[in-house]
Amino acid sequence: MPLPKMALMIVVMAGVTYLIRMLPFAFFRKKITSTFLKSFLYYIPYAVLSAMTFPFVLYSTGNIWTALAGTVIAIIASMCKQSLLTVAIIACLSVLLFGFII
């Protein structure tokens, strides 16, 4: 990936994350009591970052099938409450092994 494109993606992700976290301070003067609104404002940066980075995950290895295998294994490992480092290592090893198989 070209450096200017990567830099632009990082700047956009940082801007989106900052704006979403800053907007409640600008618009709401009182303490937010709505549980729905609190959870919405808490999770929206993660959803936006996921939506922006997930398509690149599928093309990261040069082979859609190895990337898909690594993604599925990472999701399964994270659902089994593994740590972030463990999930990353398991996903990388599964991509490597699946790449050898196909």
Image (cartoon, helix red, strand yellow):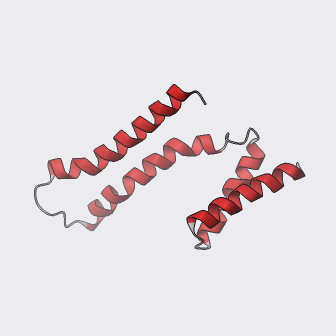
Where is residue 76? Give x, y as percent: 66, 66
Residue visible at 52% across and 33% down?
Answer: 6
Query: Is residue 73 visible to us here?
Result: no
Where is residue 90? Give x, y as percent: 70, 63
Q: Nearer the viewer, residue 4 or 78?
A: 4
**Corner quadrant of residue 97:** bottom right
Q: Tell how many labels.
A: 0
In the image, is residue 6 above or below residue 13?
Answer: above
Where is residue 55? Give x, y as percent: 59, 41
In the image, is residue 84 above or below residue 46?
Answer: below
The residue lying furthest to the right in this view is 101
Going by the image, does 62 lie left or right of 86? Answer: right
In the image, is residue 27 above or below residue 85?
Answer: above
Going by the image, does 51 lie left or right of 1? Answer: left
Where is residue 34? Give x, y as percent: 23, 65
Residue visible at 71% across and 50% down?
Answer: 68
Going by the image, does 34 lie left or right of 62? Answer: left
Residue visible at 31% across and 56% down?
Answer: 41
Residue visible at 38% across and 42% down?
Answer: 14
Q: Quadrant of the N terminus?
A: top right
Q: Nearer the viewer, residue 81 or 38?
A: 81
The residue lying furthest to the bottom in this view is 81
Query: Is residue 50 visible to us here?
Result: yes
